[in-house]
Amino acid sequence: MIRVSRVGVVNGAFVLFAVALLGRAAWVQVGQADRWRARATGQQKVETEIPAARGAILDAAGTVLVESRALVRLDIAPTEVKELRELAAALKRAGVAPEFVRRATDRTRKWVELPGRFLSSDVDDLLKMRGVHPRPVLERVRPRPTACAVCSAPSTATAAPWAAWRPRSTRRCAARRVVR
């Protein structure tokens, strides 16, 4: 009769465990390869809408009527944020209403969409935080008035970039309109 010792039983159990582990690994890598490959590919893709970059709208004389401004909308996942106090302070600096600051720092909420659009330079410290998810948005706005090339007074007509080298007689400015 074969005598089985305790050490032999433990070694046999280890061998059976190793064989089962190798069998399972082979099944996952060979038998389920297509399923895991598709799942891995899906994890690396995120579908998001990125607005098309649009240029300025000019009139016939080259004056900018409307230009595009890149902004961001902010979504916050409070459970992903590590430093809630820093988040609250940054949101207050960005001008977010106190009600939404409370919502964004409430860990019982999973997702908070903040109202409004922000310049990315204004919320740069927020964009670096984990749990803050920006969405790009383009806004069409009228350009800010520039200084008149003749009299340096604020001009309501914004000249095109190449207008500075044109002769003064052909430039559009507030001073020239007054003289006529």
Image (cartoon, rainbow, N blue to C red):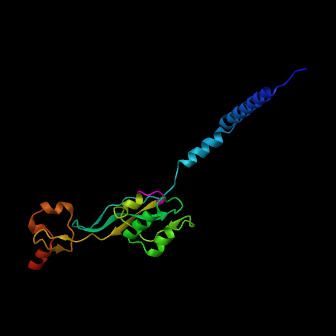
The part of the image, by quadrant, that contains residue 24 is top right
Residue 32 lies, in percent from the top left, at: 68, 39
Q: Nearer the viewer, residue 153 or 120?
A: 120
Say whether residue 47 is magenta. no
Decide which of 42, 18 is in the foreground and name it.
18
At horizontal 38% and vertical 60% (from top left) the residue drawn is 125
Residue 161 locus on image (x, y percent): 20, 61
Task: Name the residue at the top extreme.
Answer: 1
Q: Position of residue 144 (x, y in %)?
A: 25, 70
Residue 41: quadrant of the picture = top right
Res 125 seen here: yes
**Residue located at (77% from left, 27% from top):** 7
Left or right: 168 in relation to 45: left
Q: How many marks?
A: 0
The chief SS type of the magenta part is: loop
Q: Is residue 18 left or right of residue 152?
A: right
Q: Which residues are magenta?
A: 128-132
